[in-house]
Amino acid sequence: MSNNKWESFVRRVEPYIPGEQPGDANVIKLNTNENPYPPSPAVKRILDDFDCGRMRLYPDPNSEVLVDAVAEYYGLKPSQIFVGVGSDDVISMAFLTFFGSHKPVLFPNITYSFYDVWAEVYSIPYQTKPLREDFTIDPDDYKGENGGIIFPNPNAPTGVLESVDMIDEIVRANPDSVVIIDEAYIDFGGESCLPLIEKYDNLLVVQTFSKSRSMAGMRIGFAMGNEKLIKYMNDVKFSINSYTMNHLTQLCGAEAVKDDTYFRETTAKIITTRERVKLRLRELGFTFTDSKSNFIFAAHSSMAASEIFSKLKKRKIYVRYWNKPIICNYLRISIGTDEEMDRLFEALEDIINE
Ligand code: PMP
């Protein structure tokens, strides 16, 4: 088939593939690191009281109610907060804003698989740095010339947490580029590097409401950093679309972040379940990193991950599997409720002893 002339001017990209969202409500969904508990009851109250007539009006382009609530929670100034439609939106804006040099942006070879997609779509050069055998990051890999640095902490899909000291070491070594730490999973027992933003003007810390605040469907992410970084990001955002976040989302997000008691309760429950899951998975013959996130990245001693993946799927239990070098024998299993994890264990026992 011959191409039309216009096709030679198309921006061609290989898109990111998100985890499956099955229509069947009976599926036990342990494949996209969602929170198994509902959002704070305060969010439900906002929805119940919402005046539909308000939809006539454009939302506040500055999302002030949400920015103020996040700033207050983290003890920052509103001018140090950027909010976006999920952290995917926030990180994508950060790539576009900060990664404009001709030098390569650095990130690990095993990491969130959206980073190389953003680099490709924005024509940003990048270089991946291999993780060590135990899936930890070697800070020395991030000390050469570069056009920026990004990695998640804890890393995804490995769940491995790096120390704040190590992040400090990397930011200190890179005064000439912006370092982005993607803390999507930090609330499940990790120590945030947020205090470092007062020490370094080139560190951006990104978090999300999708995991620890149970609001993946609402789409709220945010970045925290020096006022100058945030201003530059807002300049780019307002050059593309002023009204990215809708009014209702802004209200719900603000209420969610104010309910610290509920947040602490649900994250603690997930951490307790995760530690129980580790014990049982070990008994079943799995090995895994000591995850500090809401998922476990596990390989079985005798059965291929691809086989376990398909057999679980037949039993309507979805986990995540990537047929990629190095990680093709691992499954990423999100932490659900205790009941869901018990159903997983039953299925695994069957599959492994078949
Ligand atoms: N960063 C990492 C490491 C993730 O795993 C995810 C979830 N897919 C995101 C960012 C994006 O999450 P969200 O857009 O829902 O905030």
Image (cartoon, rainbow, N blue to C red):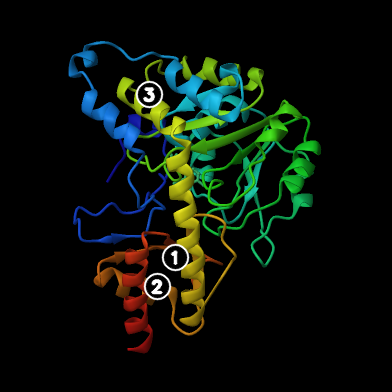
Q: Residue at x 77, y 36 (%)?
A: 174
**Pointer 2 and pointer 3: residues touching (CB < 8 Å)?**
no
Q: Residues within 10 Å of mark 2 (few under 14, many from 20)?
A: some
Amino acid at the residue labelled 2: Ser
Q: Assess whether mark 1 and mark 2 are in contact (beta carbons under 8 angstroms).
A: yes
**Residue bearing mark 3:** 250
Instruction: Tell me, yes or no, if residue 315 can be seen here.
Output: yes
Tag 3–tag 1 contact (CB < 8 Å)? no
Looking at numbered disc 1 in the image, what kind of residue is underneath it? Answer: Asn
SS type, badge 1: loop
As measured in the structure, the alpha-carbon distance from the residue carrying label 2 to the one carrying label 1 is 8 Å
Q: Residue furthest front?
A: 261
Q: Earlier in the sequence, mark 3 or mark 1?
A: 3
In this rendering, would 288 be left or right of 350?
Answer: right
Q: Is residue 133 left or right of residue 43?
A: right
For the residue carrying disc 3, how many other residues have a C-alpha within 10 Å: few (<14), some (14-19), or many (20+)?
many
Quadrant in the rendering for residue 5:
top left
For residue 354, side relative to residue 304 (left or right): left
Say which mark, if any, is on residue 207: none
Helix, strand or loop at disc 2?
Answer: helix
Q: Is mark 3 within 8 Å of ligand 1?
A: no
224 relative to 109, above or below: above
Residue 176 location (% of width, % of height) = 77, 29
Q: Nearer the viewer, mark 2 or mark 3?
A: 3
The first of marks 2 and 3 along the sequence is 3
Q: Nearest to the eye among marks 3 and 1: give it.
A: 3
Q: Quadrant of residue 74?
A: top right
Q: Position of residue 79 (x, y in %)?
A: 58, 17
Q: Kindly identify which residue carries mark 2.
A: 306
Q: Residues within 10 Å of mark 1 (few under 14, many from 20)?
A: few
Which residue lies under the disc numbered 1? 323
